[in-house]
Amino acid sequence: MNTPARRFIVLVIVTVITVAVLMAPRRAEWLAIMRDDDQQAQIIALMEPRLARNGDDPDTLATLGRAYAESGNHQRAAELLERYIVLRPNDADAYARLAELYKDTDQDRRATLLRRSLALKPRLLHAIELADLYHDSQRAAEEQALLLRYEPELTLQSGLRLRLARLLAAHGDQLGALRVLMRSEALTAATRPIQGQDERLYLAELLVAAGRSAEAVELGKRWIVQWHEPWLADQLLRSVALQAPVADASDLAEAIVTVHPEVRFFLVNGLAKMGAGAVARHILATWNRANPTPSMNEISAFLSACREQGEPGIVWQAFAEVLKHRAPDDVITRYSEAIVAEYGIGALAPLWSNLPPAVIEGRPLLGARLAFHEHDPVLTRWLLERVDLRAVDTSDRQIWFDLLSAIASPSEVFAALRHRWSSGRLPKDLMARFARSAAQLGHEGEYRAALADLRRID
């Protein structure tokens, strides 16, 4: 026998053996292997003739249904699985698979199938699918009843504990909502990334609404430390600030600015805008105690916040405490200069006698301004003479010159400028004034010398 004929006979024998294997008890295993290899078309080609011969074989219907589903022909798959569940009405997994096939076409049928699957085999995964269907179709009562059945299994990650709590609260069962959230791991979870923040925020709202604001605050203090996120702490405060007693809300606000001091004035502004002015005032009033050695910029920010909130009294209270407890002289000096910059020299004048002498000695220009405000030209002149014009900025030198011009005659102003010029202590911006003064008074030599100095500097 020639080689081609021999090969043909071998192929026929292999085909017969293959068909025999398909008819053998190991057929299901062979089909499973084909499914793993994504050979859906071959499965369909092999099984459709078998279905034609025996349309009521559950195994054939199930196998073909899965093959069509995995190949993307959901309509044919659904048709086959619908026939299958008539023959095998207690196959919970089949109902769930069939429900998935209706995901994009028939939500009512899908819900019916999921209910049947859950009745036969309760599984959280399918319960979540059904709950989502109820949620999307606004069937709140059915959604609530379903979630209550599975409440012990609801996880933080699924978000269903929060949904159940909101449903219960919406139906007037605040205690039930509290029970659901109090049993959640959201109370104690301290792992990162952050989880359960929405559950915590809503729990805080519920506790406050139930008259348990102190409990909400104690939980909140724990959470803000775990979060390490000022924006979450801000949301927590906003969720309780209007409903909780001022003392409790202020207690929580104080805990937040202790952990996140950089957001104090942000919180003040936000609280005031939402109508929680008393809480805003509290954390504004406690700023100075939390900042015993503030910088000039920090004091300026504090004064600006007080001005924006219409609370100048908090400024005077803070400054009074600084003076009373005898803060370091540099701190008192910063407060003094910031107050003058914000409110003018007249605001500081009533407190002049309370300022330590070292403050005036270190800031003679500030003292000169106070003396001038109190109509004391002699002291003003004496303090102006002690100002190092090279150590202050241009705006302060302008103030110095204006004060000197207000209490001295033109010739005295010229003499004061010449004294500093001759000793090399007159800054460039005042040298032009000196030249002008010399020209006006007829001091030709000083005028020409001052101009020469200006050209050399330029």
Image: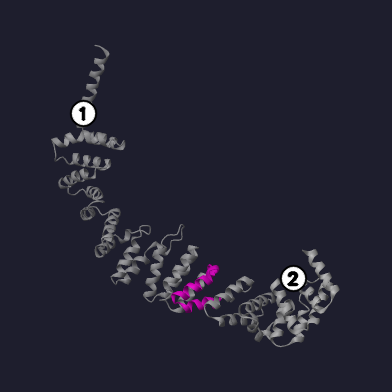
Amino acid type, mark 2:
Asp
Give x and y (percent) for residue 393: 71, 71
Q: Quadrant of residue 174?
A: bottom left
Q: Is residue 356 visible?
A: no
The residue singled out by tag 2 in the image is: 429
Lateral position of residue 295 relative to residue 77, left or right? right
Q: Position of residue 351 (x, y in %)?
A: 66, 85
Badge 1 element: helix
Q: Residues within 10 Å of mark 1 (few under 14, many from 20)?
A: few
Q: Residue at x 67, y 80 (%)?
A: 326
Is 306 or 114 nearer to us in this picture?
306
Residue at image location 34% in from the left, 62% down from the top: 161
Residues under numbered marks 2 and 1 in contact, where contact means CB atoms less than 8 Å apart: no
The tag earlier along the polypeptide, 2 or 1, is 1
Mark 1 — residue? 19
Q: Quadrant of residue 55?
A: top left
* Residue 187 can be seen in this image: yes
- Magenta part, dominant SS: helix
Counting the numbered discs, the total is 2
Q: What is the span of residues highlighted in magenta in the rendered image?
A: 257-286
Q: Which callout, 2 or 1, points to the residue nearer the camera?
A: 2
Was residue 82 drawn as part of the magenta stretch in this picture? no
Q: Secondary structure at mark 2?
A: helix
Vertical order, 9 against 412 (above or below): above
Q: Residue at x 24, y 52 (%)?
A: 121
The quarter in which the C terminus is drawn is bottom right
Residue type, label 1: Val
User: Along the line of sight, which residue is nearer the eye, 321 or 181?
Assistant: 321
Query: Residue 79: x, y in percent?
Result: 18, 45
